[in-house]
């Protein structure tokens, strides 16, 4: 049986290149595939393979100083959902371009929001109602197919957009509310919640383990709605067969969670398109400009 394993850990790393080489050698020895980012801030990874090999990977990785208490998140999937095993060194674990304002210690990122277990999220909403606001820490297209009920979805295409978005003045009315940030596995909210607190948001929280852990606890019986977008061959995952389909096809406006890559190879954008509309090749372009460019190349 195969699984996908998602994890991260913010802790100081003295030699990121050495960590990279060790992780790459370990993963290759276990025939795992996936993506791992390492930096002097820690590690952030998604790996897939046979479950026994993944258990060995967990056991070995926990031996590295600072990685003993990593929160591991398991999900359905296989190694075939990833093209290869990629291990890279980056300046930041998440590209918020916030390196100079973030301090990472053995205890993690300094000044983050309060970590909430899934049941504590529900309890907070039950107690404070509309005074609780969910704030999506992902990219806008991820939120189009799945999000927490009534969540605020920032206008972001990449993580780099968040600082500008937070400083735009759009969210002043949220600064005195209880703001629950969320993302896929929690890594982005470690930084986002800290950045929000530095910009005057007074009562900030984050979901421990992110959407993945919340979905494990409540599936589609809680406050989450829709499909969880993931950055691999699966493209998305549902927590149960009761999942709502909240995404909207850009052409027929029918409900869908299906994303396709733009038909223009040089375009990195995704097209939210239903199974019916995608049968027409002309509809698989992100925009009219992409379609026109493809036609010009074909001439």
Image (spheres, rainbow, N blue to C red):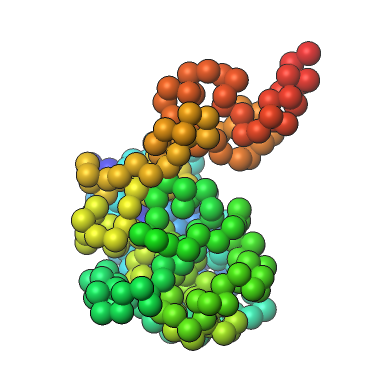
Give whichever of 69, 195 is nearer the camera: 195
The structure residue drawn at horizontal position 44% and vertical position 84%, both measured from the top left corner, is 203
270 over 65 or under it: above or below: above
240 over 223 or under it: above or below: above
Give whichever of 84, 261 is nearer the camera: 261
Q: Position of residue 294 (x, y in %)?
A: 71, 23
The structure residue drawn at horizontal position 56% and vertical position 19%, both measured from the top left corner, is 281
Give whichever of 81, 282 is nearer the camera: 282
Judge whether residue 34 can be spotted in this image: no
Quadrant placement of the C terminus? top right
16 over 283 or under it: above or below: below
Tell me if 199 is positioned left or right of 24 in this view: right
Q: Position of residue 8 (x, y in %)?
A: 43, 66
The structure residue drawn at horizontal position 24% and vertical position 74%, both measured from the top left corner, is 126
Judge whether residue 100 can be spotted in this image: yes
Tell me if 104 is positioned left or right of 121 in this view: right
Q: Position of residue 83 (x, y in %)?
A: 48, 38
The structure residue drawn at horizontal position 39% and vertical position 50%, both measured from the top left corner, is 146
Quadrant placement of the N terminus? top left
Tell me if 203 is positioned left or right of 245 in this view: right
Q: Position of residue 184 (x, y in %)?
A: 41, 58
């Amino acid at each position: 049986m195969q699984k996908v394993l998602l994890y991260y850990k913010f802790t100081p790393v003295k030699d990121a290149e050495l960590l990279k080489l060790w992780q790459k050698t370990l993963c290759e020895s276990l025939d795992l595939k996936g993506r791992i980012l390492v930096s002097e801030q820690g590690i952030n990874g998604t790996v897939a393979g046979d479950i026994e090999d993944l258990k060995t990977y967990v056991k070995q990785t926990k031996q590295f100083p600072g990685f003993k208490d990593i929160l591991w998140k398991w999900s359905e999937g296989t190694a075939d959902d990833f093209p290869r095993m990629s291990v890279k060194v980056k300046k930041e674990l998440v590209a918020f371009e916030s390196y100079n304002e973030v301090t990472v210690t053995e205890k993690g990122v300094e000044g983050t929001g309060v970590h909430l277990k899934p049941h504590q999220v529900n309890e907070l909403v039950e107690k404070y109602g509309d005074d609780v606001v969910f704030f999506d820490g992902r990219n806008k297209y991820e939120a189009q197919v799945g999000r927490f009920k009534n969540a605020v979805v920032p206008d972001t295409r990449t993580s780099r957009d968040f600082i500008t978005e937070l400083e735009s003045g759009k969210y002043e009315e949220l600064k005195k509310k209880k703001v629950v940030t969320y993302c896929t596995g929690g890594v982005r909210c470690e930084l986002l919640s800290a950045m929000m607190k530095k910009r005057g948001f007074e009562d900030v929280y984050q979901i421990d383990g992110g959407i993945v852990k919340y979905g494990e606890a409540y599936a589609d019986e809680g406050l989450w709605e829709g499909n969880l977008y993931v950055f691999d061959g699966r493209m998305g995952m549902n927590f149960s067969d009761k999942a709502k389909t909240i995404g909207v096809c850009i052409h027929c406006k029918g409900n869908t969670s299906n994303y396709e890559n733009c038909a223009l190879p040089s375009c990195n954008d995704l097209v939210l398109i239903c199974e019916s509309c995608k049968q027409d090749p002309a509809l698989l372009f992100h925009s009219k400009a992409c379609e026109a460019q493809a036609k010009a190349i074909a001439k």
